[in-house]
């Protein structure tokens, strides 16, 4: 008897968000503009953090210093065919990769395509998902809509020989139909968090038959993440009573959607890397849970992290506390202490993770610098 498929928590969270986003009309021809960037600025270690982050008032936006993704000077050597393990909803399958000439790397946050690019294989990409928005991919056709649903016709028209995905876009049946149509499909699933960028680098590099390139990128990411978190720790409050209590809120105001991110979403590790206290971890929330007035008031965060498009969907910070009075009753709401960051960046856990942490730290601890 075939065992029932077990859906990993990462896929559950991703599919739930995709389902929530599906309320918006789909588009396979356009995707969001490149998020704005901050440009040249002082190193994080050279800026002065707020003396008391708990007293600061007002919203702020986290911006990367640059939009492009660093790539190696030369394309890594490949050895094909390569045999890898595809994690199809908890059922590991061995897949042989014969060609990587025409690739689609598709997921909800754009991290897989970003990893392909960071490894030096960007020229193999023939299309993109709606969340893949960095310089160099603007001319690629979009094959997922605003609800992260795949257009099978758009995919097949591109004649890909390989699709790399993680289960956060779909429907799954469509992905499996594409495999049945002769396209090699590999599922790469990494638990969201600070270990994900390096793990994803190794997994994607293995698919391309270039494990050495994956190891090099993984080591670089681990070193850079460690460096930025140590820089933050050196200036952020040390005592627990002085630390900011934070929570990640997913919102889509037009559809009345408000979800809190709990364990296994990666938000907790990000908040802890930022020197804060993750309320979801403290409270024991797992995955995504609908925001209730009672839960948020009881949690009483000092700072709320949101996605930029989500905050815009309610008209900004001031309108948010009017729309949801319970948020206005929290310390964060009273001080309008919201930090937003581009949807495709803040929880992507791809090759730009060190820069994401750096940008969030600036918005939290040095918002006026």
Image (cartoon, rainbow, N blue to C red):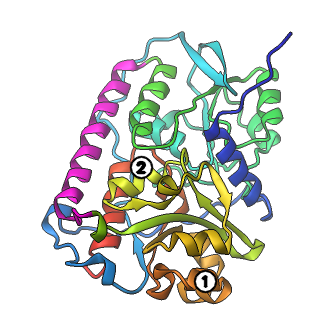
| Magenta span of residues | 210-239
In the displayed structure, does residue 216 sit left or right of residue 335? left
Q: Nearer the viewer, residue 221 or 52?
A: 52
> Going 48% across and 52% down the picture, which residue do you hit?
281
Kind of element beneath mark 2: helix
> Going 42% across and 17% down the picture, which residue do you hit?
78
In the displayed structure, does residue 220 sit left or right of residue 347? left
The spot of residue 53 in percent (x, y) is: 29, 76
* Res 367 quadrant in image: bottom left
Q: Do we see residue 34 in this rendering?
A: no
The residue that label 1 is drawn on is 320
Residue 222 magenta = yes
Residue 156 magenta = no
Q: Nearer the viewer, residue 131 or 336?
A: 336
Kind of element beneath mark 1: helix
Q: Nearer the viewer, residue 228 or 270?
A: 270
> Going 63% across and 39% down the picture, which residue do you hit?
9
Give the crowd class for mark 1: few <14, some 14-19, many >=20 residues within 10 Å: many
Q: Earlier in the sequence, mark 2 or mark 1?
A: 2
In the displayed structure, does residue 21 sit left or right of residue 112? right
The spot of residue 111 in percent (x, y) is: 51, 44
Which quarter of the image is occupied by the C terminus?
A: bottom left
Q: Do we see residue 128 in this rendering?
A: yes
The spot of residue 156 in percent (x, y) is: 77, 34
256 versus 137 height, above or below: below
Q: State whether the magenta stretch is mostly helix, strand or loop.
A: helix
Which quarter of the image is occupied by the N terminus?
A: top right
The residue that label 2 is drawn on is 269
Checking the image for residue 167, the label placed there is: none
């Amino acid at each position: 008897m075939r065992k029932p498929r077990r859906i990993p928590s990462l896929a559950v969270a991703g599919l739930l968000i995709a389902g929530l986003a599906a309320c918006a009309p789909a588009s396979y021809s356009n995707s969001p503009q490149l998020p704005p960037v901050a440009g040249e600025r002082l190193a994080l270690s050279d800026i002065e953090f707020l003396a008391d982050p708990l007293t600061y008032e007002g919203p702020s936006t986290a911006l990367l210093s640059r939009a492009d993704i660093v790539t190696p000077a030369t394309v890594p050597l490949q050895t094909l065919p390569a045999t890898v393990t595809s994690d199809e909803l908890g059922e590991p399958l061995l897949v042989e990769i014969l060609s990587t000439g025409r690739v689609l790397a598709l997921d909800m946050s754009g991290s897989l395509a970003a990893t392909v690019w960071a490894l030096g294989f960007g020229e193999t990409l023939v299309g993109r998902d709606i969340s893949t928005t960095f310089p160099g991919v603007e001319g690629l056709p979009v094959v997922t809509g605003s609800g992260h649903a795949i257009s099978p016709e758009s995919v097949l028209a591109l004649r890909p020989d390989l699709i790399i995905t993680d289960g956060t876009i779909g429907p799954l049946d469509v992905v499996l139909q594409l495999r049945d149509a002769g396209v090699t499909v590999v599922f790469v699933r990494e638990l969201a968090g600070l270990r994900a960028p390096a793990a994803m680098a190794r997994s994607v590099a293995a698919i391309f038959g270039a494990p050495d390139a994956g190891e090099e990128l993984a080591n670089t990411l681990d070193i850079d993440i460690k460096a930025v978190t140590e820089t933050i720790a050196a200036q952020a409050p040390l005592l627990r009573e002085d630390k900011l209590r934070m929570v990640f809120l997913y919102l889509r105001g037009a559809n009345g959607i408000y979800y809190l991110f709990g364990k296994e979403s990666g938000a907790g590790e990000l908040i802890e890397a930022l020197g804060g206290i993750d309320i979801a971890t403290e409270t024991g929330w797992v995955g995504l849970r609908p925001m209730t007035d009672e839960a948020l008031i009881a949690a009483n965060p000092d700072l709320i992290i949101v996605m930029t498009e989500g905050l815009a969907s309610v008209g900004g910070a001031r309108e948010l506390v009017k729309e949801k009075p319970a948020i206005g009753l929290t310390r964060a709401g009273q001080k309008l202490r919201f930090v937003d960051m581009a949807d495709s960046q803040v929880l992507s856990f791809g090759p730009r993770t060190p820069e994401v942490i750096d940008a969030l730290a600036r918005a939290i601890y040095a918002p006026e610098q």
